[in-house]
């Protein structure tokens, strides 16, 4: 296990790994504080247009040039639903009406930050679609042929959406 944190956020003492219950946990050598390395929570908002195409954004910061479902991190004091609405607005200019939680996934693609992502299904209620924030381009794409994606979890989510759409189409043909 690679140690990523070395100083206690409470008193500044040195952190070391010690056995705590079922696993090794970072513990302060001065005050005994246990530093839990918990994942960060992210949110992503799935917007489908009338043709069943998904809204994606091309990233301008990390993972530059690759596409993703509009997403971002939840602030410490923020409700996850509010974070989803805020992130969609910040990145695409669209106001969202959240309909449901679609899926929850663990993201292990970045070894520096383990995240838990929550993907929401939303309707675009208002606003003008435009790339902003961490995105430099936005557009709607066919679920069966998305552009190169930044995150493996987005790929899994889009694949699941495409399979559900194909199943719905198949059952309505009879």
Image (cartoon, rainbow, N blue to C red):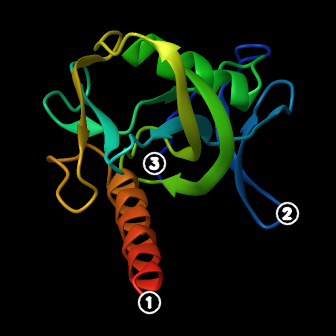
Q: Residues within 10 Å of mark 1 (few under 14, many from 20)?
A: few
Query: Where in the figure is residue 141, as x and y percent of width and height?
Result: 23, 44
Would residue 122 be visible to someone looking at this image? yes
The residue beneath circle 2 is: 21
The residue beneath circle 1 is: 174
**Nearer mark to the viewer, of 3 and 1:** 1
Q: Residues within 10 Å of mark 2 (few under 14, many from 20)?
A: few
Q: How many marks?
A: 3
Query: Where in the figure is residue 71, as x and y percent of width and height?
Result: 46, 31
The residue tagged with tag 3: helix, strand or loop? loop
Residue sitting at the far front = 174
Q: Earlier in the sequence, mark 3 or mark 1?
A: 3
Q: Quadrant of residue 165?
A: bottom left
Q: Quadrant of residue 81?
A: top right
In space, the residues marked 2 and 3 are separated at their CA atoms by 20 Å
Question: Which residue corresponds to the image point at 77% horizontal and 25% vertical from the top-left?
Answer: 79
Residue 150 numbered tag: none
The residue tagged with tag 2: helix, strand or loop? loop
Query: Where in the figure is residue 31, as x and y percent of width and height?
Result: 86, 25
Q: Quadrant of the C terminus?
A: bottom left
């Amino acid at each position: 296990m690679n140690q990523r944190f070395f100083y206690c956020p409470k008193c500044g003492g040195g952190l070391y790994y010690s056995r705590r219950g079922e696993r090794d946990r970072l513990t302060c050598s001065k005050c005994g504080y246990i530093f839990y390395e918990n994942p960060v929570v992210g949110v992503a908002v799935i917007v489908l247009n009338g043709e069943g195409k998904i809204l994606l954004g091309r990233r301008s910061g990390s993972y530059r040039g690759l596409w993703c479902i509009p997403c971002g991190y939840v602030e410490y004091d923020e409700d996850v639903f509010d974070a989803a609405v805020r992130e969609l607005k910040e990145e695409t200019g669209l106001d969202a009406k959240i309909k449901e939680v679609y899926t929850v996934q663990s993201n292990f693609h970045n070894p520096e930050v383990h995240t838990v992502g929550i993907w929401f299904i939303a309707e675009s209620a208002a606003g003008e679609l435009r790339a902003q924030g961490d995105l430099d381009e936005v557009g709607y794409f066919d679920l069966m042929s998305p552009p190169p994606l930044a995150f493996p979890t987005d790929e899994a989510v889009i694949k699941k959406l495409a399979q559900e759409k194909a199943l719905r189409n198949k059952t309505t043909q009879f």
